[in-house]
Image: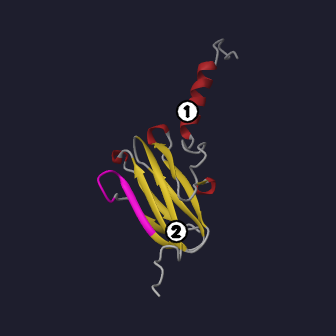
């Protein structure tokens, strides 16, 4: 396309497109960036994913379904604590049940055990800078299965 003064406007269009891309929420096109698009994680298995704040992937949402009353043990491990990772667990209506911001050891592992009722529980995982891989494990033990038999 020719500019009124005879110059092409292609560089100007390219600049405008680049600026528009920068103005958009960098995480909006990532599939698990919002609670409404959380990815289900299976119980009793380890799931591995990553965050990359420098690349725009600052947050992931996951959820798991508890089928019955029982004990849920959540373990989240980040490869790099220097990324300032954080984990928040909420119930189905968004009430924060726990912040797991501080690891229980120097290797970046966060653990939480709760007595859970049936329903969906959400994990909001984030990092402030850099990139890191992480793993999530949700162990579920139905109520009654973790008790010793009564002696006769």
- Which of these two is toward me, 26 or 142? 142
Q: Residue furthest bottom?
A: 152
Residue at the disc numbered 2: 141
Magenta stretch contains residue 48: no
- As rendered, which of 63 and 101 lies closer to the eye? 63
At mark 1, the secondary structure is: helix
Res. 91 mark:
none
138 vs 29: above or below: below
Q: Who's the residue at 51% across and 59% down the image?
A: 123
* Mark 1 → mark 2, Cα distance in angstroms: 51 Å
Picture residue at 59% right of the left edge, 20% below the top: 11
Image colouring: secondary structure
In this view, the residue in front, 142 or 87, is 142
Pick out the residue farthest to the front.
152
Sequence order check: which comes first, mark 1 or mark 2? 1
Figure label count: 2
Residue 110 horizontal side relative to residue 150, left or right: left
Q: Where does the magenta region start and end?
A: 104-113
Q: Residues within 10 Å of mark 2 (few under 14, many from 20)?
A: some
Farthest-out residue, left: 106
User: Where 129 falls versus 113 (above or below)?
Assistant: above
Residue pointed to by mark 1: 19
Label 1 crowding class (10 Å Cα cut-off): few <14, some 14-19, many 20+? few
**How far across and down, in percent of the image, does residue 66 sit?**
58, 67
Residue at horizontal 46 percent and vertical 64 percent from the top: 73
Q: Quadrant of residue 26?
A: top right
**Residue 5 percent across, percent down from the top left:** 65, 14
Q: Does residue 46 sit above or below 55 in this rendering?
A: below
The answer to whether 47 appears left or right of 5 in the picture is left
Q: Is residue 107 magenta?
A: yes
Q: Where is residue 55 shown, x and y percent of the image?
A: 48, 37
């Amino acid at each position: 396309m020719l500019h009124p003064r005879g110059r092409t406007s292609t560089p100007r269009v390219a600049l405008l497109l680049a600026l528009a891309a920068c103005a958009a929420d960098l995480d909006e096109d990532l599939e698990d960036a919002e609670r409404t698009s959380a990815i289900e994680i299976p119980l009793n298995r380890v799931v591995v994913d990553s965050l990359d704040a420098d690349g725009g992937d600052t947050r992931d949402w996951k959820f798991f379904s508890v089928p019955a009353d029982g004990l849920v043990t959540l373990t989240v491990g980040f490869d790099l604590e220097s990324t300032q990772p954080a984990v928040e667990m909420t119930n189905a209506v968004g009430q924060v049940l726990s912040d797991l911001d501080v690891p229980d050891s120097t290797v970046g592992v966060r653990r939480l055990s709760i007595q859970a009722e049936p329903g969906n529980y959400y994990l909001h995982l984030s990092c402030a800078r850099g990139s890191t891989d992480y793993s999530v494990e949700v162990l579920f033990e139905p109520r009654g299965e973790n008790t010793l038999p009564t002696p006769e």
